[in-house]
């Protein structure tokens, strides 16, 4: 019969929601909207997300290029609908073609999307588009709606709390990066991108060239967690039509800066960077950190600056590898890691070396809040100043199936000495002047560009393979 408290709580929730609706005014439309987060909370979420992004995916290590992107973005901030919000712009070190905004004005473009672009005006339009999402608080509005729908004002995680602590997945802010925006949100962000670029004296019509290149681009067969621009910013014919309607004939007088832009990305890493680790014939090699280990057969691999993750295709087992600088002895180091597992039952331990490298191993049974327990193996291996920690996971009932395979991977860890892998370097963009006679395909053949990149590079140059590039205009090739 005691129903008073739940009723009071529910009324309290409703009151909070109604108060938010009454107080929140959208900076772009000037209309009241459902918004459960203050600007201070939004900025705090953005700061946390930025830190997680830098750890998990990495910022491209080219200070001049990052400063250039930041300068273009900052030039548009004074004309935005949130000019007093401190904006941050950075280049994410991934070949995936995307751009996105974290809460609180943190905006990112990938080096993959920079390779697709062909002018400073395109860059301005894309940065302006992301600024539009920030200005209109699109992601925060989505999150507010989700929270109300889920009644308890709690956003559910895409994975269980138990698995999340192993995977190193970021907080709610990271999840917001990969939301699929609604059609109306994209229309509004496009319009704002055009406006902000135009006010910064860039020709906004270059947004159409960018859209065209996106449509020509082959879908990337990538295992990266970051989705592509087309998946997070869905393209429609109506969207392109609306952009065409907003572009003025007067805009052609504004800056495009094609050559300036291309010279900025000359030499930029293209595609996956093998210096950060690569897979070949079932072995993961890391030239910079000089190690290798054998992967379980047919497992999906995701490599980020934070960790290497290999997962069984049906998700029944996973292996993580992380490296940390530490002078601590292996035993206390492993015990500290074990505490992060929560209530874990130690089953056995070992101090067997791994290919003459000092190591400590421990096996645990870890209860989950929901579902059956996990079988967890921790293996900490010291190589020079770093301790490499393997975390091998499977459901407890499947341990006999997967743990032997996981053990083989861990025990294969060794120092990399083979120059064939140590000296592996990335492909880089290079610029070439066409002579007006050779086709793009002929230029790539003579430059020794691997055939597997031909279609992608054609799209990135806004050309067909049998097109003859215009004399004197830079063409992007690889070296």
Image (tube, rainbow, N blue to C red):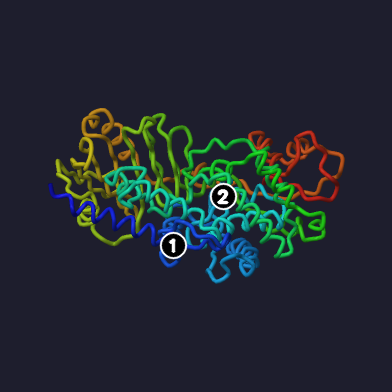
State the residue position of label 2.
Answer: 185
On the rendered structure, is 437 left or right of 246?
right
Name the spot of residue 142 as percent of width and height, x first. Answer: 46, 50
Q: Earlier in the sequence, mark 1 or mark 2?
A: 1
Q: How many marks?
A: 2
Name the spot of residue 388 as percent of width and height, x first. Answer: 33, 50
Residue at image point 63% right, 49% down: 428
Residue at image point 45% right, 61% down: 46
Q: Which label was assigned to residue 479?
A: none
The answer to whether the residue labelled 1 contacts the one labelled 2, judged by CB atoms less than 8 Å apart, is no
On the rendered structure, is 438 left or right of 207?
right
- Does any portion of residue 305 appear in the rendered image? no
Q: Secondary structure at mark 1?
A: helix
**In the image shown, does 26 or 87 lie closer to the viewer?**
26
The vertical placement of 270 against 84, above or below, is above
On the rendered structure, is 352 left or right of 240?
left
Q: Secondary structure at mark 2?
A: helix
Q: Which tag is nearer the camera, tag 1 or tag 2? A: 1
Residue 266, image quadrant: bottom right
Residue at image point 39% right, 58% down: 18
Name the spot of residue 82 as percent of width and height, x first. Answer: 56, 66
The vertical placement of 185 against 443, above or below, is below
Name the spot of residue 130 as percent of width and height, x first. Answer: 58, 55
**In the image shown, does 391 or 208 lie closer to the viewer?**
208
Crowd around label 2: few <14 · some 14–19 · many ≥20 (10 Å): some
**In the image shown, does 327 or 149 lie closer to the viewer?**
149
- Report the residue that reaches farthest toward the bottom: 84
Crowd around label 1: few <14 · some 14–19 · many ≥20 (10 Å): few
In space, the residues marked 1 and 2 are separated at their CA atoms by 22 Å
- Does any portion of residue 70 appear in the rendered image? yes
The vertical placement of 159 against 30, above or below, is above
Q: Which label was assigned to residue 22?
A: 1
């Amino acid at each position: 019969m005691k129903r008073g408290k739940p009723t009071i709580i529910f009324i309290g929730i409703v009151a909070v929601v109604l108060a938010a609706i009454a107080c929140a005014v959208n900076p772009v439309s000037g209309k009241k909207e459902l918004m459960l987060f203050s600007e201070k909370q939004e900025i705090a979420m953005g700061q946390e997300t930025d830190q997680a992004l830098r750890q998990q995916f990495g910022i491209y290590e080219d200070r001049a290029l990052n400063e250039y992107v930041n300068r273009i973005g900052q030039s548009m901030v004074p004309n935005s609908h949130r000019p007093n919000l401190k904006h941050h712009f950075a280049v994410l070190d991934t070949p995936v073609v995307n751009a996105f905004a974290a809460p609180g004005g943190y905006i990112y473009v990938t080096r993959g999307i920079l390779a697709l672009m062909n002018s400073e005006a395109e860059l301005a339009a894309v940065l302006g588009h992301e600024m539009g999402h920030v200005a209109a608080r699109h992601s925060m509005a989505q999150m507010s709606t989700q929270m109300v729908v889920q009644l308890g004002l709690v956003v559910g995680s895409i994975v269980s709390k138990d698995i999340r602590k192993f995977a190193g997945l970021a907080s709610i802010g990271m999840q917001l990066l990969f939301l699929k925006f609604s059609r109306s949100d994209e229309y509004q962000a496009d319009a704002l991108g055009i406006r902000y670029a135009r006010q910064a004296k860039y020709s906004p019509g270059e947004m159409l060239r960018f859209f065209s290149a996106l449509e020509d681009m082959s879908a990337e067969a990538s295992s990266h967690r970051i989705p592509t621009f087309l998946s997070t910013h869905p393209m429609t014919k109506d969207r392109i039509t609306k952009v065409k309607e907003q572009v003025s004939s007067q805009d052609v007088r504004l800056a495009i800066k094609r050559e300036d832009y291309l010279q900025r990305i000359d030499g930029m890493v293209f595609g996956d960077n093998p210096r950060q680790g690569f897979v070949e014939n079932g072995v993961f090699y890391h030239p910079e950190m000089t190690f290798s280990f054998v992967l379980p057969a047919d497992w999906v691999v995701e490599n980020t600056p934070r960790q290497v993750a290999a997962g069984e295709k049906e998700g029944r087992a996973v292996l993580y590898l992380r490296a940390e600088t530490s002078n601590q002895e292996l035993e206390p180091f492993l015990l500290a890691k074990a505490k992060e597992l929560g209530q874990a039952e130690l089953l056995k331990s070992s101090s067997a070396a791994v290919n003459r490298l000092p190591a400590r191993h421990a096996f645990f049974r870890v209860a989950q809040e929901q579902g059956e327990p996990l079988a967890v193996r921790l293996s900490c291996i010291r190589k020079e100043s770093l301790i490499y920690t393997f975390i091998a996971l499977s459901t407890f009932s499947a341990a006999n199936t997967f743990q032997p395979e996981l053990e083989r991977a861990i025990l294969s860890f060794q120092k990399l000495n083979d120059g064939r892998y140590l000296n592996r370097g990335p492909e880089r963009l290079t610029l070439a002047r066409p002579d007006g006679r050779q086709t793009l395909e002929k230029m790539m053949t003579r430059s020794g560009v691997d055939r597997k990149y031909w279609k992608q590079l054609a799209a990135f140059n806004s050309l067909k393979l049998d097109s003859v590039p215009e004399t004197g205009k830079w063409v992007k090739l690889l070296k």
